[in-house]
Image (cartoon, rainbow, N blue to C red):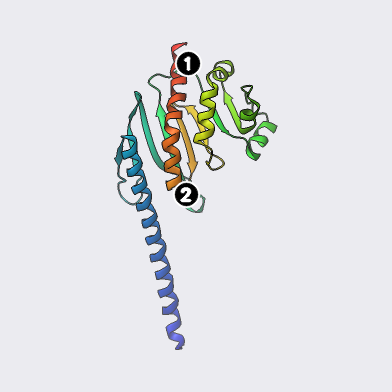
């Protein structure tokens, strides 16, 4: 092979690699949007397409009198950039209640070691699975009734580690790292009513303030 041709061959392979990466990213983005549009249809909500290459698609609407949003967002930049998928339910009224629930694991054990306070509900199996924090322990413990605990376990049975449900800034929100896969869309469809139940809890707390 002519040595003068080698740099052009390397450049051509590099360009092909870039094109392949861009095409793969575009295809994955299109598939995720198709899944989101289908999810919006099943939930009776509106799908709002992304604007431009860097924009994010959203699902918006109302469920049980509460504002619902399902969306992607990114944090960080460059190699440290992370993509997230979230579902948010805004209670009709909010008070001072805050809470956070996530699956027990190595991270929660470390947090507990460094002083993070959790509550238990008196259900040994549930308490072993969930790490729960709140600023109103007695109220929230009572609010996590058996039927709600069953719904939580069922909705997040296949969820990835690190997912968290939290009430803050006027909304009950769940988020996981990654895009809208078929499994995640199915999980969020089951999870949405549970988040609405937790938003009901927030409304009750607000009414008692």
Q: Position of residue 114 (x, y in %)?
A: 68, 32
Q: Residue furthest top?
A: 208
Q: Pointers 2 and 1 in contact (CB under 8 A)? A: no
113 lies above or below 207: below
Q: Position of residue 123 (x, y in %)?
A: 63, 24
Q: Position of residue 122 (x, y in %)?
A: 64, 22
Q: Residue furthest bottom?
A: 2
**Camera sees residue 57:** no
Name the residue beneath numbered marker 1. Answer: 205
Q: Nearer the viewer, mark 2 or mark 1?
A: 1
Q: Nearer the viewer, residue 54 or 4?
A: 54
**Of the numbered discs in the image, which one, if any, rests on residue 186?**
none
Q: Nearer the viewer, residue 22 or 200?
A: 200
Q: Position of residue 76 (x, y in %)?
A: 48, 46
Residue drawn 54% across and 33% down? 153
133 lies above or below 185: above
Q: CA distance from mark 2 to mark 1?
A: 38 Å
Q: Quadrant of residue 197?
A: top left
Q: Quadrant of residue 126?
A: top right
Which of the two labelled residues, at mark 2 and mark 1, occupies the earlier sequence position? 2
**Label 2 crowd bin: few (<14), some (14–19), many (20+), radius 10 Å:** few
Label 2 SS: loop
Residue drawn 50% across and 30% down? 151
Name the residue beneath numbered marker 2. Answer: 77
Residue drawn 39% across and 37% down? 70
7 lies above or below 60: below
Q: Nearer the viewer, residue 58 or 31?
A: 31
Label 1 SS: helix
**Label 1 crowd bin: few (<14), some (14–19), many (20+), radius 10 Å:** many
**Camera sees residue 125:** yes
- Count of numbered tags: 2
């Amino acid at each position: 092979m002519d040595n003068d041709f080698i740099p052009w061959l390397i450049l051509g392979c590099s360009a092909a690699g870039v094109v392949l990466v861009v095409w793969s990213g575009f295809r994955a983005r299109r598939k995720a949007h198709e899944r989101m549009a289908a999810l919006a249809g099943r939930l009776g909500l509106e799908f709002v397409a992304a604007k431009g290459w860097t924009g994010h698609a959203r699902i918006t609407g109302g469920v049980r009198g509460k504002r619902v949003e399902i969306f992607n967002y990114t944090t960080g930049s460059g190699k440290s950039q992370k993509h997230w998928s979230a579902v948010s339910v805004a209670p009709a009224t909010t008070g001072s209640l805050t809470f956070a629930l996530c699956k027990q694991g190595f991270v929660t054990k470390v947090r507990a070691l460094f002083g993070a306070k959790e509550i238990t509900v008196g259900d040994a199996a549930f308490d072993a699975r969930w790490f729960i924090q709140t600023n109103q322990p007695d109220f929230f413990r009572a609010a996590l009734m058996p039927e709600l605990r069953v719904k939580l376990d069922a909705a997040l049975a296949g969820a990835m580690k690190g997912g968290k449900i939290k009430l803050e800034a006027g909304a009950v929100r769940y988020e996981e790292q990654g895009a809208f896969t078929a499994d995640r869309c199915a999980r969020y469809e089951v999870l949405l009513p549970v988040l609405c139940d937790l938003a009901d809890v927030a409304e009750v707390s607000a009414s008692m303030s």
